[in-house]
Structure formats: C-alpha cells, structure tokens
Amino acid sequence: MTTGVTIARSALILMRMVVFGLTLGITLISFQAYRKRPSERLQYAFVGFAFISMGVAISSVITQLSAGETGALVRVFFQMSETIPFIIGFAMLYVSLYR
C-alpha cells in the first residue's frame, strides 16, 4: 500500500515539474517575441505568462506546505494566495488580446 502512494506522489511531482517547465517555455517564447518586435500587446502577454508561471510554482509549493496539520483558516489563506498570480496573469493575457 505504501509503495503505491509513493509511486503516485512521485508521478504527481513529475507532472507538476512538466507543467512548470511548459509554462516557463511559453514565458520564454513570449519574451523572445517581445524582444524581437516590441509592442504593448506582446509586453502584456509576456507579463501574463510570467505570472501564470509564478502561479504554477506557488501552487506546487503551497500544496507541499499545506499537506501537514494546518487549520482551516490557514488552508484558505494558502489557497487564496496561490490564486492571485493566476488572476493577474490571465487578466494580463486578456488585456493583451483585447487592447
């Protein structure tokens, strides 16, 4: 039973690393596009992808921190703080597409 849980956790960690790597790749590509042809739209897109990458990283760390014995209020605070970079990132992407 314990081996199955260990394998599942290892797979989850690997998947989170893949997601983080993909978001960093998209951020790098958007930064290169902005450097090649500077525009306000590409700048907003780059900042949006950077915040989304930060949100992915924060959510992985917070999941590990809140896995132990924490109170309900602390868990809610962690979940709120991991949502903020996603809100900012998607808002920046929205601005880059509709501005």
Image (spheres, rainbow, N blue to C red):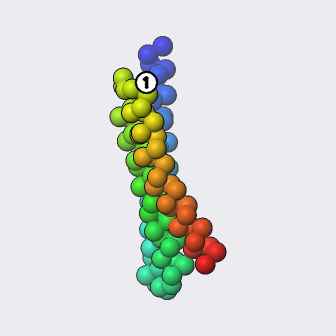
Residue 64 location (% of width, % of height) = 38, 34
Residue 29 location (% of width, % of height) = 48, 70
Q: Quadrant of the C terminus?
A: bottom right
Please tell me which residue lies in front, 28 or 42: 42
Q: Residue flagged by tag 1: what amino acid is it?
A: Thr
The answer to whether residue 2 is above or below residue 28 is: above
Dot 1 crowding, Cα within 10 Å, few <14, some 14–19, many 20+: few
Tag count: 1
Residue 53 location (% of width, % of height) = 45, 57
Of all residues, the one furthest to the top in this rendering is 1
Per the image, the residue denoted by label 1 is: 6
Say which residue appears at 57% left-offset and 72% top-offset. 95
Helix or strand or loop: what does disc 1 sit on?
A: helix
Residue 30 location (% of width, % of height) = 49, 72
Say which residue appears at 47% left-offset and 85% top-offset. 38
Please tell me which residue lies in front, 52 or 88: 88
Say which residue appears at 51% left-offset and 82% top-offset. 40
The answer to whether residue 61 is above or below residue 4 is: below
Regarding residue 21, the answer to whether it shows in the image is: no
Occupied quadrant, residue 85: bottom left
Of all residues, the one furthest to the front in this rendering is 73
Of all residues, the one furthest to the right in this rendering is 98
Regarding residue 77, the answer to whether it shows in the image is: yes
**Horizontal placement of 58 versus 94: left or right?**
left
Say which residue appears at 52% left-offset and 71% top-offset. 45
